[in-house]
Image (spheres, grey):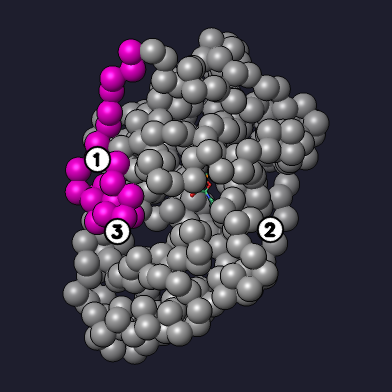
Amino acid sequence: MTTQVKAPAKSGAPQGTTAVVRTVADLRAHVAAWHGQGLRVGLVPTMGALHHGHLSLIDRLADHVDRVIVSIFVNPAQFGPNEDFSAYPRREAQDLAALETVGADLAYLPDVKVMYPQGFRTNIHVKGLSEGLEGDVRPGHFDGVATVVMKLLMQSQCDCAIFGEKDFQQFAVLRRLVIDLDLPVEIVAGPIIREPDGLAASSRNVYLNTEQRRIAGQLNLVLADLRRRAMAGEDLRVLEQEGEKALLAKGFDRVDYVRFCNAESLETAEDLAAPVQLLAVAVLGKTRLLDNVQIG
Ligand code: AMP
């Protein structure tokens, strides 16, 4: 499904006026001016290679704030040594053009030295939520995410920030971070935006060849079937095993996990008494595809 993206509803900024800053001082100067006018400021943290999932977050955030900042930073700290940091798509000119089209007010594009100056030593670890699922497959990943997001929130002094539910565990980690550290930032969730065949939009989908792209569209269908069967009362552990088998039979090369989890703690769910989320990662070649669906 393609989402129609409108300009930030309350920004008043005509389209085509996205300012670009690359330093904390310049970022804060814009935000201080807006706060001086009594405006509420929101942040959409991204790693760029923007797609309609990212743009939907800008649109949604505009309902909560007067000015929207989009940060683009491919954060080395959240990539493992054998992951795709250097291959990760970087498309600054295209991204800035997309931001102008949707009327984002400010683009913040720090480089690595701005985010991690010489002597940088701090690491933020959100216990428990950072372990298991993605945390097991990508050790240290959520420390990299929590640390960079903490920095972006502090640098921008934003009043509100939005994160996509596509990265469900990431959302849980960041929601906890903000609560635990009493950050005066409202956190908003953006629903998963999907391609016409149901594949969750992702910057990494460009890695898929034609055959892999066809198979990728099966992931959400398998999850929808598991959801239906869970709600009909089938055993969750058996469904996880069958889900894994079904994905391999559809042509996925590997399945990292298919797990029914408590939607808040992300602990393995034994039943559907409390809100449950089904989280899965299936792999095609080197591309890990994340998806999740609410049960109930
Ligand atoms: P990324 O650039 O992959 O770090 O993503 C930046 C933000 O966009 C994160 O909050 C993601 O959860 C969110 N996001 C990425 N893909 C989607 C999608 N398909 N639907 C909704 N949000 C998304």
Pointer 2 with pointer 1, Cβ within 8 A: no
Q: Residue at x 46, y 34 (%)?
A: 75
Quarter containing the N terminus: bottom right
Reading the chain from its start, which is encountered first: label 2 or label 1? Answer: 2
Is 78 magenta? The answer is: no
Pointer 2 with pointer 3, Cβ within 8 A: no
Closest to the observer, 36 or 258: 258
Q: Residue at x 33, y 50 (%)?
A: 138
Relative to 228, does residue 92 appear above or below in the rendering? above
Provide the major secondary structure of the magenta segment. loop
Q: Position of residue 177 (x, y in %)?
A: 30, 37
Say which element carries label 2: loop
Mark 1, ligand 1, within 8 Å: the answer is: no
- Disc 2 residue crowd, few under 14, some 14–19, many 20+, Cα 10 Å: few
Magenta part of the chain = 119-140
Mark closer to the observer (2, 3): 3
- Residue that mark 1 sits on: 126
Identity of the amino acid at label 3?
Leu
Relative to 163, does residue 44 appear above or below in the rendering? above
- Residue that mark 3 sits on: 133
- Disc 1 residue crowd, few under 14, some 14–19, many 20+, Cα 10 Å: some
Q: Position of residue 220 (x, y in %)?
A: 51, 73
- Residue that mark 2 sits on: 3
Mark closer to the observer (1, 3): 3
Residue 61 visible in the snapshot: no
Closest to the observer, 296 or 237: 237
- Disc 3 residue crowd, few under 14, some 14–19, many 20+, Cα 10 Å: many
Say which element carries label 3: loop
Residue 235 visible in the snapshot: yes
What distance separates the C-alpha of mark 2 from that of mark 3?
A: 29 Å
